[in-house]
Amino acid sequence: MSDLISARQTARRLEDAVRSVVRGQDAALRNILACLAGGGHALVEDVPGTGKTTLAKAIARAVSGSVFKRVQFTPDLLPGDILGVSIFDPRTQEFRFRAGPVFCDILLADEINRAAPRTQSALLEAMAERQATIDGERYDLDALFFVIATQNPVEFRGTYPLPEAQMDRFMIQSRLGYVGPAEERAILAAQIGSHPVDSLAPVIDRADLLELLSATREVRIGEELRGYIVDLVAATRGRAEVQLAASPRASIALMRMAQALSLFEGRDFVIPETIQSIAADVIAHRLVIAPEAKLSGMSGRRVVAEILASVPVPV
């Protein structure tokens, strides 16, 4: 219990620090931090200028001792630019591996859908297994490896839809959206002299964050709620409007997110409302909707909403 109390305090300090920089996005911010605590990766989709990059930088600055790398995805980016390459050293007559930016704690994959699918897919192994195979050699990544990727809506020029396998690697897909006028005035006031992220001081260290990740697994989730999660995910299969349904990876992600979010909410156990609140962010982006259903206005989030309304809630 003491570990969970300490973890809740760590979560609160981290959330308060990032919230001091990213204003008016409390719900999305908590979900993304819960994704970090749950050991997953987050995809943030929104129009330019809504604070996606600032959010990632604020998280990294709030954690002392973490290694932060940023990759700006462009059409000419190659897989080796992310993973690393072997370079021939004429002095030793041997190839020497030069690690790419993927070897870090927090990786910002900025505008990931501006790169070609081949380059996007370079992250598949790293995100799923925390390892990278380069020139036949396996390189292990650190236990603290968090990818926060940003993407512009796919209708923007110069963007490529992420492959289904890549989308499935993200624990959640979130949106920030526009803030209200009051929050926007506060943002202007905060940036008169300098950007607030530049003065953000660390509030936890790397060891604290690793303990938070470990404590999240200790949050209790009963057998009935695990069954509820399975029922929600299984309900995406067999629907006429869904070409590709959610896999068991979605069930695991929903359970981990529910545990982490419960910790941020101040509880050491999961309740159905927490599962329901995060279900769309976890499941919707994994679904491929049939073209004719899209024309009728169907979307992944609408499918999840219908499932939540139809699947019985355990009592």
Image: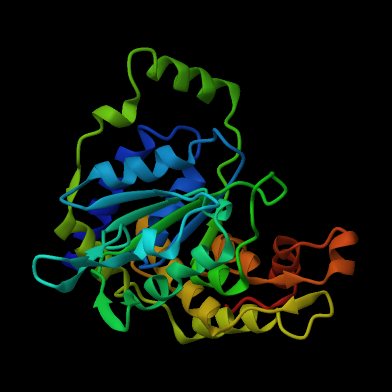
The relative height of residue 157 versus residue 36 in the rendered view (above or below) is above
Residue at the extreme left = 92
User: Is residue 285 in view from this perspective?
Assistant: yes
User: Is residue 4 in view from this perspective?
Assistant: no
The relative height of residue 100 versus residue 236 in the rendered view (above or below) is above
The colour scheme used here is: rainbow
Q: Residue at x 80, y 80 (%)?
A: 239
The relative height of residue 13 versus residue 136 in the rendered view (above or below) is above
Counting from the top left corner in percent of width and height, residue 181 is at 59, 21
Quadrant the N terminus occupies: bottom left
Counting from the top left corner in percent of width and height, residue 126 is at 37, 72
Which residue occupies the foreground of this view, 314 or 115? 115
Left or right, 297 with respect to 254, comes to right
Give the total of numbered labels.
Answer: 0
Left or right, 250 with respect to 216, comes to right
| Quadrant assignment, res 61 | top left
The relative height of residue 149 versus residue 3 in the rendered view (above or below) is above
Which residue occupies the foreground of this view, 76 or 15? 76
Which residue occupies the foreground of this view, 77 or 65? 77
Counting from the top left corner in percent of width and height, residue 220 is at 36, 76
| Quadrant assignment, res 309 | bottom right
Counting from the top left corner in percent of width and height, residue 10 is at 23, 52
Quadrant the C terminus occupies: bottom right
Q: Residue at x 62, y 63 (%)?
A: 280
Q: Residue at x 43, y 63 (%)?
A: 41
Which residue occupies the foreground of this view, 42 or 282? 42
